Image: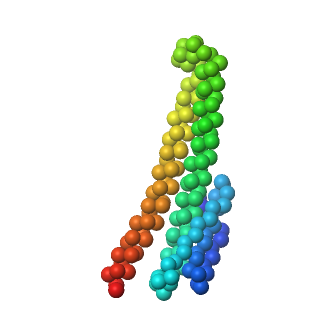
């Protein structure tokens, strides 16, 4: 999936950089704010990079939520079918292609939720790791 940066802004006085990305699912905005003591070393490139990662993380969070809604709908459908067939569900489930399809969708949506949540956490961890590395470099330069 391609994300396109459609808006970028940087305020030198406050050290706030905002980026908005767009894809077929909508617009997602990320923001990075510089600490006051780092204002002389903070660049628009650094701020843009952090803000873009945060916008991508926002998108991953959105997709995970969207997939959870689909997963819940399929779970409810399975529950309704199980209730409809009652005690005969086990024998029907073995041969019914719709029940098989529902099982596949449950697996697919569960995996999608997990994948998007993992990507969200990966992006958040990336920001933390880069910030920690930046702090180490600043300490060495003092």
Residue 9 visible in image = yes
Please say if 114 is above or below 11. Answer: above
What kind of colouring is applied to the model shown? rainbow
**Residue sitting farthest toward the front:** 36
How many numbered circles does the render carry? 0
- The spot of residue 74 in percent (x, y) is 61, 33
Whether residue 45 is visible, yes or no, is no
Which residue is at the front of the view, 26 or 124? 124
Image quarter hosting the N terminus: bottom right
For the point 64% across and 25% down, which residue is it? Answer: 80
Nearest the camera: 100 or 135?
A: 135
Residue drawn at x 39%, y 70% as measured from the top left: 132
Residue at (62, 20) in percent of width and height? 83
**Residue 4 point in image, percent of width and height:** 62, 64
Quarter-of-image position of residue 77: top right
Q: Is residue 55 above or below residue 70?
A: below
What x and y, as percent, mark residue 66? Answer: 62, 46
Classify the position of the C terminus by image quarter: bottom left
Query: For residue 76, what is the image quadrant?
Result: top right
The residue sitting at 49% across, 45% down in the picture is 114
44 relative to 71, above or below: below
Question: In the rendering, at what x and y percent does residue 71 appear?
Answer: 59, 38
**Horizontal placement of 9 versus 140: left or right?**
right
Residue ranking furthest to the left: 140
């Amino acid at each position: 999936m391609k994300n396109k940066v459609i808006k970028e802004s940087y305020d030198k006085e406050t050290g706030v950089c905002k980026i908005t990305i767009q894809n077929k699912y909508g617009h997602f905005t990320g923001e990075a704010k510089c600490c006051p003591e780092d204002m002389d070393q903070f660049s628009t490139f650094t701020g843009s990079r952090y803000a873009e990662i945060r916008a991508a993380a926002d998108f991953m969070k959105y997709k995970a939520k969207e997939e959870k809604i689909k997963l819940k709908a399929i779970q409810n459908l399975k529950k309704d079918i199980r209730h409809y067939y009652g005690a005969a569900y086990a024998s029907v489930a073995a041969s019914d292609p719709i029940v098989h399809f529902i099982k596949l969708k449950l697996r697919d949506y569960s995996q999608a939720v997990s994948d998007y949540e993992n990507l969200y956490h990966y992006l958040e961890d990336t920001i933390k790791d880069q910030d920690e590395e930046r702090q180490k470099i600043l300490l060495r330069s003092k």
